[in-house]
Image (cartoon, grey):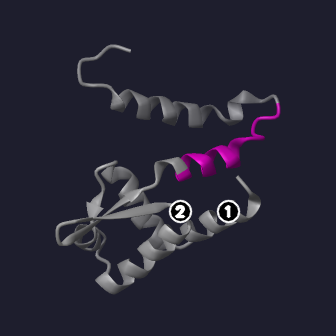
Amino acid sequence: MELILAVKRLSALAQPARLSVFRFLVKAGPQGAAAGDIARALEITPNTLSAQLNVLANAGLAISRRDGRSIIYTADYDSMSQLLVYLMEDCCQGRPEICSPLADVAARAACCDRPQGALS
């Protein structure tokens, strides 16, 4: 990832409402959420939400698709992963304990992707 793209994505997230919208989309999962549902859940007016979603989409962090009369938004997980990898590429410098909390989060997330009752 180039520096300019990383800055663009970080800038898109550097505002409380946009960060809340992005986190909501991440939690919504690959199925996404309708714009109206996002606005209600986060108590954001539709026009403000539209502006926030446009910034996230322009940064490559959100994707939209039409489903009937609704527009469904999802987080772009590939772009999010690329940004996280870019931020962590040079981490640790021989001190793995610095990055271990991230490995713990990743392990918990992977755990939740398994069907219930599945063994690791």
CA gap between label 1 and label 2 equals 9 Å
Pinpoint residue 37: horizontal percent, then vertical percent: 23, 67
Pinpoint residue 78: horizontal percent, then vertical percent: 52, 47
Residue that appears at 50% across and 61% down: 61
> Does label 1 or label 2 sit earlier along the sequence?
1
User: SS for tag 2?
Assistant: loop
The magenta stretch spans which residues? Answer: 79-93
Where, by quadrant of the figure, is residue 108 drawn? top left
Magenta span has 84? Answer: yes
25 up-or-down from 41: above or below: above
Q: Is residue 92 left or right of residue 103?
A: right
User: Mark 2 belongs to which amino acid?
Assistant: Gly
Q: Are marks 1 and 2 in contact (CB under 8 Å)?
A: yes
Observer able to see residue 19: yes
Give the percent coordinates (x, y) of residue 87. Answer: 69, 49
Residue displayed at 47% across by 49% down? 77
Mark 2 — residue?
A: 60
* Residue at mark 1: 5
Task: Specify the farthest residue to the left.
Answer: 68
